[in-house]
Amino acid sequence: MSGWARTADGWAANLDGSDAAAVFSLPRLELRTSTVGWRSVCLLADGTLRESSNGSMGSVVAAKAAALEQAGRMLGPAHAAALELLR
């Protein structure tokens, strides 16, 4: 598992273990910068996008935690091991 990778506008993690800075793969978690902090986004395998209901967070640590929690609810047990490696 490659883990969280720095991107042009934040952080990303591909759940297939590939390097999210070099390859775009779904499902994928992204933390995006905004004017009020970090936004957590989960890009699902079907190409749809779900933003965290927590809105913007001030710290990248809080945003990563929210992204992992949200992804766990949306993706279920099939991706539990990959999500655990990102903690």
Image (cartoon, helix red, strand yellow):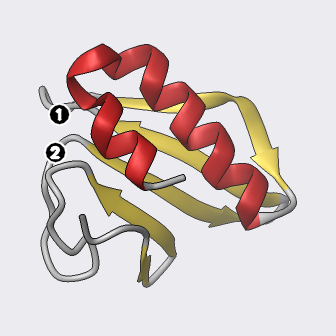
Q: Nearer the viewer, residue 2 or 24?
A: 2
Q: Residue at x 54, y 27 (%)?
A: 70
CB within 8 Å, label 1 to label 2? yes
x and y percentages locating residue 54 in the rendered image: 75, 30
Q: Nearer the viewer, residue 39 or 79?
A: 79
Q: Nearer the viewer, residue 50 or 71?
A: 71
Task: Name the N-terminal-most of marks 1 and 2.
Answer: 2
x and y percentages locating residue 10 in the rendered image: 54, 73
The local crowd at label 1, few if under 14, some if 14 to 19, many if 20 or more residues have their Cα within 10 Å, is few
Residue at mark 1: 47
Residue at mark 2: 26
- Disc 1/disc 2 C-alpha distance (Å): 7 Å
Quadrant of the drawing holding the N terminus:
bottom left
* Vertical placement of residue 57 versus 33, above or below: above
* Vertical placement of residue 71 versus 20, above or below: above
The local crowd at label 2, few if under 14, some if 14 to 19, many if 20 or more residues have their Cα within 10 Å, is some
* Vertical placement of residue 4 versus 36, above or below: below
Left or right of residue 25, residue 8 in this image: right
